[in-house]
Image (cartoon, rainbow, N blue to C red):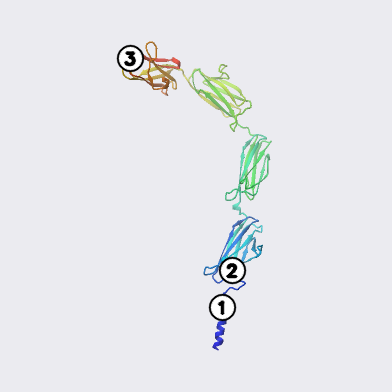
């Protein structure tokens, strides 16, 4: 009896042992085994594929035994497994290899969506499983984008505008495959379908021309992108740009300034065709010649984009100049400041006495005014010193040529210096002089020599 009981116990223990161990054909994973699964890439095209990588571990952290079978399924697409000869065939059973690893491949079947891949132990392991997702095709929020640019956007009839299209993926990277489709509501496109490539970096262009006036709306799309548009206007009347430049910009009453005329288009190019410019003078008159007939208004033809006319100031000082227009241009102006001619110079020396035997300096200050006693600015004043015979004396001057322009206060100031014993013996006095415009008007003061 005891012997039978011992044999029965041994048989039960053997059965339990055999049930918990791997078989040669399909090793059984022990309870508590785990699986991990990943897909690379996790997003594929409608005709793409992704590699599914699986790793299995026993409860003690060691990899599953080689030969352990796994079931792999997907919600959309096809699972492909590799045979011993290397060929990929449809299937849903894979075996673990070295280090507890196994692989399969997900192939798209043309359906758009998210494939959920599930891997599970075929037996044992208490139903251990793992999942991963692969996106097949693009989600609506991941659509590519396209932008358009037209250059120029205002075109003459039968002119040409270049339409440039930039296609990008959802992440902003250049879209280098696909077809950009273009259409227009007016005119003729050079191409209506353009192929993207790696070389063009997502940028393609075509041309648009029209013999009919109006606004063309150009629309483009790529793949599943939204439409993008840009407008090009044909037959617009463009405004020429008139420029007037006065030289000099400050003149005396009854003096002249030369007015340079230039006419340009919106691209800053000279308009060389014949144009008619209408000009008006303010505080002066105009003529095509410096010795011609001057009138308050002038109409001149301009060929080649440039021409010169003349402005003659009247006898009233003030802010004058020339204004004009050509065609439908904006009014252009050239400002000219008209001032009264200098009428008087008032010279003031800082001292009226110098010493012959020592170095002596005199600051000379000259005030220039016009006939209305207004102070005249920017007028060149020349200073010198002469003896009784009119011969110039030797001295140093703080300004080159001993000349200086009046400031806004109408005053010009220099300092002259006589070195010791440079004033000849016998000279008891000399004259300092300030003059404008070659000598008239001028003013003099007498300096005594000690």
Mark earlier in primary sequence (2, 3): 2
Specify few, some or many for label 3: CA neighbours under 10 Å numbering under 14, 14-19, or 20 or more.
Answer: some
Specify few, some or many for label 2: CA neighbours under 10 Å numbering under 14, 14-19, or 20 or more.
Answer: some
**Residue 419's image quarter?**
top left
Q: Is residue 174 left or right of residue 421?
A: right
What is the secondary structure assignment of the residue under circle 2? Answer: loop
Residue 432 is situated, as x and y percent measured from the top left of the image, at 38, 16
Of the pair 5 and 240, the residue shown nearer to us: 5
Q: Nearer the viewer, mark 2 or mark 3?
A: 2
Mark earlier in primary sequence (1, 2): 1
Q: Mark 2 — residue? A: 66
What is the secondary structure assignment of the residue under circle 1? Answer: helix
Residue 60 is situated, as x and y percent measured from the top left of the image, at 52, 69
Q: Is residue 405 visible?
A: no
Q: Is residue 424 left or right of residue 379?
A: left
Q: Mark 3 — residue? A: 448
Q: Mark 1 — residue? A: 16
Of the pair 140 and 60, the residue shown nearer to us: 60
């Amino acid at each position: 009896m005891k012997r039978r009981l011992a044999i029965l116990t041994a048989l039960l223990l053997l059965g339990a042992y055999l049930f918990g161990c791997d078989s040669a054909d399909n090793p059984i994973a022990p309870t508590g085994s785990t699986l991990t699964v990943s897909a690379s890439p996790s997003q594929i095209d409608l005709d793409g594929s992704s590699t599914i990588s699986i790793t299995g571990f026993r409860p003690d952290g060691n990899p599953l035994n080689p030969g352990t079978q796994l079931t792999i399924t997907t919600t959309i697409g096809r699972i492909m497994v590799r045979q011993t000869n290397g060929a990929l065939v449809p299937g849903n059973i894979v075996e673990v290899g070295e280090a507890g690893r196994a692989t399969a491949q997900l192939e798209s079947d043309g359906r758009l969506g998210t494939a959920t891949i599930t891997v599970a132990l075929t037996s044992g392991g208490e139903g251990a499983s793992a999942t991963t997702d692969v996106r097949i095709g693009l989600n609506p929020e991941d659509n590519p984008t396209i932008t358009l640019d037209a250059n120029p956007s205002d075109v003459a009839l039968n002119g040409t505008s270049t339409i440039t299209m930039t296609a990008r993926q959802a992440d902003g990277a250049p879209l280098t495959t696909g077809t950009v489709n273009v259409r227009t509501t007016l005119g003729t496109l050079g191409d209506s379908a353009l192929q993207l490539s790696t070389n063009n970096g997502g940028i393609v262009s075509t041309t648009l021309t029209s013999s009919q006036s109006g606004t063309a709306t150009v629309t483009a799309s790529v793949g599943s992108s939204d439409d993008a548009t840009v407008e090009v206007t044909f037959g617009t009347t463009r405004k020429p740009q008139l420029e007037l430049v006065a030289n000099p910009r400050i003149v005396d009453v009854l003096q002249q300034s030369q007015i340079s005329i230039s006419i340009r288009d919106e691209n800053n190019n000279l308009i060389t065709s014949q144009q008619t410019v209408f000009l008006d003078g303010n505080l002066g008159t105009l003529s095509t010649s410096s010795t011609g007939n001057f009138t308050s208004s002038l109409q001149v033809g301009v060929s080649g984009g440039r021409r010169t006319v003349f402005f003659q100031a009247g006898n009233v000082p003030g802010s004058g100049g020339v204004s004009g227009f050509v065609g439908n241009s904006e009014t252009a102006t050239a400002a000219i400041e008209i001032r009264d001619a200098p009428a008087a110079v008032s010279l003031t020396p800082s001292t009226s006495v110098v010493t012959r035997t020592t170095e002596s300096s005199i600051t000379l200050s000259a005030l220039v005014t016009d006939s209305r006693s207004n102070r005249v600015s920017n007028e060149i004043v020349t200073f010198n010193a002469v003896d009784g015979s009119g011969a110039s004396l030797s001295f140093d001057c703080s300004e080159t040529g001993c000349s200086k322009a009046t400031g806004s206060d109408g005053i010009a100031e220099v300092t002259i210096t006589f070195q010791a014993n440079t004033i000849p013996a016998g000279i008891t006095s000399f004259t300092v002089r300030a003059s404008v415009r070659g000598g008239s008007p001028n003013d003099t003061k007498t300096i005594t020599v000690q």
